[in-house]
Amino acid sequence: MDFNHFSNELAVLEIVRSSNFIRPRKLTSGQLYMALIRLQSDVPSIESFMAMIDELVKEGLLISATVLDHDASFPYTQHIILGLTEIGEAALEESSAQADHFLPVIGEPSFNQNVIKP
């Protein structure tokens, strides 16, 4: 799995968490895909995305209320997502903590720069 795959997974988890911030709401896989398109310029194919949502549910990161009946015109597993599990929430917190660890370093001058002191 490449970086974009994990980036897409984290983006989906964040979309679900954000959408349930004020009040719980149900999201279809299609709504999640459209939200990802608005959020990122590089998105997976619809087939890969639907497989990713199914995998996130199977891994216990997303709560699925139900799986929609098979539709021959759209042959992918479609979930109605209720929210994040505790594991999904923990995964987001962990990725956020790792990102926060590197933020202070961004603004500091490098050791090789000549710093002029007054």
Image (cartoon, rainbow, N blue to C red):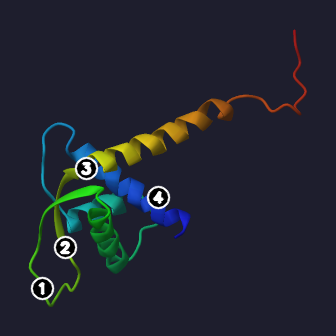
Q: Nearer the viewer, mark 3 or mark 4?
A: 3
**Mark 2 neighbour class, 10 Å CA radius: few under 14, some 14 to 19, many 20 or more:** many
Question: Pointers 1 and 2 in contact (CB under 8 A)?
Answer: yes
Amino acid tagged 4: Ser
Q: Nearer the viewer, mark 3 or mark 2?
A: 3
Q: Position of residue 47 (x, y in %)?
A: 33, 80
Q: Mark 1 sits on what residue? A: 71
The span from disc 3 to disc 2 (Cα, nearest Å) is: 18 Å
Amino acid tagged 2: Gln
Could you tell which of marks 4 and 1 lies nearer the N-terminus? 4
As drawn, is 23 to the left or to the right of 111? left
The span from disc 1 to disc 3 (Cα, nearest Å) is: 27 Å
Q: Circle 3 — which element?
A: loop
Q: Mark 4 sits on what residue? A: 7
Q: Mark 3 sits on what residue? A: 85
Q: Vertical placement of 79 versus 73: above or below?
A: above
As drawn, is 82 to the left or to the right of 97? left
The span from disc 1 to disc 2 (Cα, nearest Å) is: 10 Å
**Mark 4 neighbour class, 10 Å CA radius: few under 14, some 14 to 19, many 20 or more:** few
Q: Vertical placement of 97 versus 61: above or below?
A: above
Q: Position of residue 98 (x, y in %)?
A: 54, 41
As drawn, is 104 to the left or to the right of 112? left
> Residue 78 — which label?
2
Q: Position of residue 84 (x, y in %)?
A: 25, 50
Could you tell which of marks 1 and 3 lies nearer the N-terminus? 1
> Residue 26 — which label?
none
The residue lying at 28 percent from left, 66 percent from top is 58
The span from disc 3 to disc 4 (Cα, nearest Å) is: 19 Å
Q: Nearer the viewer, mark 1 or mark 3?
A: 3
